[in-house]
Image: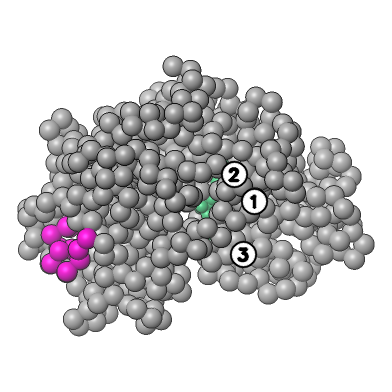
Amino acid sequence: MPYEDIYRRSIDDPEGFWAEQARAIDWHVPPQSILDYAEPPFRRWFAGGMTNLCHNAVDRHLDARGDQNALIAVSTETDTTREISYRELHREVNTFASVLRALDVGKGDRVVIYMPNMAEAVFAMLACARIGAVHSVVFGGFAAHNLALRIDDATPKLLIAADAGMRGGKVIPYKPLVDAALQAAASPPPHVLIVSRGLDPDHARVEGRDVDYATLRAEHDGREVPVEWLESNEPSYLLYTSGTTGKPKGVQRDVGGYAVAMALSMRTVYDVGPGQVMFSTSDVGWAVGHSYNVYGPLIAGATALLYEGLPTNPDPGIWWELCARYKVRTMFSSPTAIRVLKKQDAAWLRKHDLSSLKWLFLAGEPLDEPTATWITEGLGKPVIDNYWQTETGWPVLTLLPGLDLKPVKFGSPGLPNLGYRTRVINEATGEDAAPGEKGVLVIVPPLPPGCMTTVWNDDKRFLSSYFGHFRELLYSSLDWAVRDEDGYTFILGRTDDVINVAGHRLGTREIEESVATHPSVAEAAVVGVQDELKGQVPIVFATLRQTVATTPGEAADGMLRCVVDQLGGVARPARVYVVNALPKTRSGKLLRRSLQALAEQRDPGDLSTLDDPNALEEIRRILERGPDGGS
Ligand code: ATP
Ligand code: MG
């Protein structure tokens, strides 16, 4: 059926549309109403319905596909591969749930999970879901401070941690971070459950507080724990936003709406059905990891491929090797990861048999055209840009190859997803922007199923962060966008990433795009810095591709020419700095605010979400040394 027809129906008759979609999951008690919108913008999807995420992800599939792989966990760090059938998953999750019960965790209690991409992280999440506990997975790469912040916000009954993670062959013990976080936390949980892989066998244990999972697992193995049926709108999990723009927000997700959105998107967006394999390279600590490493594929009865390791280890073909070995149908990754691969030879993309691979989805940040072209041509597969936020839990803008694939337009994540009423609003007038005119991307409430229900414990922050920006009640994405005549939306960057050059408002994203068209450039970041004459001027930080031989000076001149040719003299960057690495958050997003602060000789601010603190040190040195190009 044509996309347009189904999309229209999802907008014109949301209750009819979602009532149909709700049939894709199991309900213990069917919804009593499809949409309760008595208190806008708060909404309750499938009110009165009783269901459970673990039941829908695991138990429901036992009869038809008990012996099919549910989860394949590959780690090139620990050199292990685990293939886990739905039946085995059921047993592991029940065992884990029984352990949680023994540690006095029950319905509504929060559980913080601090683990890398290992099978037990998935068991732990599903075990929480089974007993109605609210999990909050904290990315394993976050340091003690970040963990403590999230513990204090979520006030968990239990912390589940791995003994260690690994990155590029190096063991990163988690226990010292956990101990430091609990020391700093105002309300530490009474117990820490350590899931050890023997990576840090001598870790310190606090008597009475720390418990060992392997010991308890042996005790509880094979016990069955009944599913706790939850009202559709009760919380299922909390997930904090990346903190690119400030203090992370505790995004709260529901049960029924999320399950239905997962089922719908697996079919229509990701084109993955029962028995097929989806490989998402995300970390379980991110939104994509929750939705498409775990819940989406399992709710669909598919096989989830979970990967721990670098995309370049043991060689830059490892992801494609896994696609070939497991006949992956749909792969999901991020532009950052592809840029890492893009520094390597494109021949790695053609070494393995990718005849089963149909789609590559990329999400999380702008997909620049050169990267999109490189990967599309290299793989010979459609590459689909996905726009979403932790808040939404599934894509807002996308193409839907599972339904009706519209043409890809480079630079655009495409069209509104089913159920999303998106608009682009002129910031000053609050009116709809004309095609080609820049505005703020908003979603007209009620937000569709799957999106956040509120900010954990803070309805006021939910309202003020997202709904207080316009006269009308609209959810603001806080991202700039422009829509073309065909209804394709282009994201132009965050609303706080705009610079004002001599009265002209320029999006940093547009300049970055232009700089990146230069063949030497691997990745670019543009920030506005204060200038006496012009107010602000754009300056460029860029990394170069390893395979291109050129001097930093030549590359810088080339970048300037690209911008002048494509955007005009007004956008011409004042300075270009060639660097080895750009500062990024642990989720791979550019930290422009720190770059800008350094360039203006200010304090770079909260660096706790920074991936590699050395990147900023290098930039400090390079700023002192002077630019490679510009005036
Ligand atoms: P915080 O809200 O705490 O500052 P964050 O916005 O980085 O953190 P996420 O929810 O992980 O946290 O990221 C969502 C944002 O990522 C979007 O609002 C948008 O700015 C950017 N983004 C995601 N996908 C795309 C895409 N396909 N194209 C352009 N930008 C994207
Ligand atoms: Mg955000």
Q: Is residue 109 left or right of residue 6?
A: left
What amino acid is labelled 1 in the image?
A: Phe
Write the start and end of the magenta stretch as one range.
96-107
Note whether 18 is above or below 211 in the view shown. Answer: above
**Rendered location of residue 66, percent (x, y):** 14, 36
Mark 2 vs mark 1, CA separation in Å: 10 Å
Number of numbered discs present?
A: 3
**Splitting the image into 4 quarters, where does residue 33 fall?**
top left
Residue labelled with disc 3: 615
Residue occupying the point 48% across, 39% down: 395
**Splitting the image into 4 quarters, where does residue 267 fall?**
top left
Residue occupying the point 27% across, 31% down: 23
Residue occupying the point 13% across, 49% down: 91
Element type where label 2 sits in the image: strand
Residue 544 appears in the picture as rendered: no
**Of the residues tagged 2 and 3, which is closer to the observer?**
2
Residue 470 badge:
1
What amino acid is labelled 3 in the image?
A: Ala
**Residue 401 shown in magenta:** no
Q: Earlier in the sequence, mark 2 or mark 1?
A: 2
Q: Residues within 10 Å of mark 2 (few under 14, many from 20)?
A: many
Residue labelled with disc 2: 442
**Of the residues tagged 2 and 1, which is closer to the observer?**
1
Q: Residues within 10 Å of mark 1 (few under 14, many from 20)?
A: some
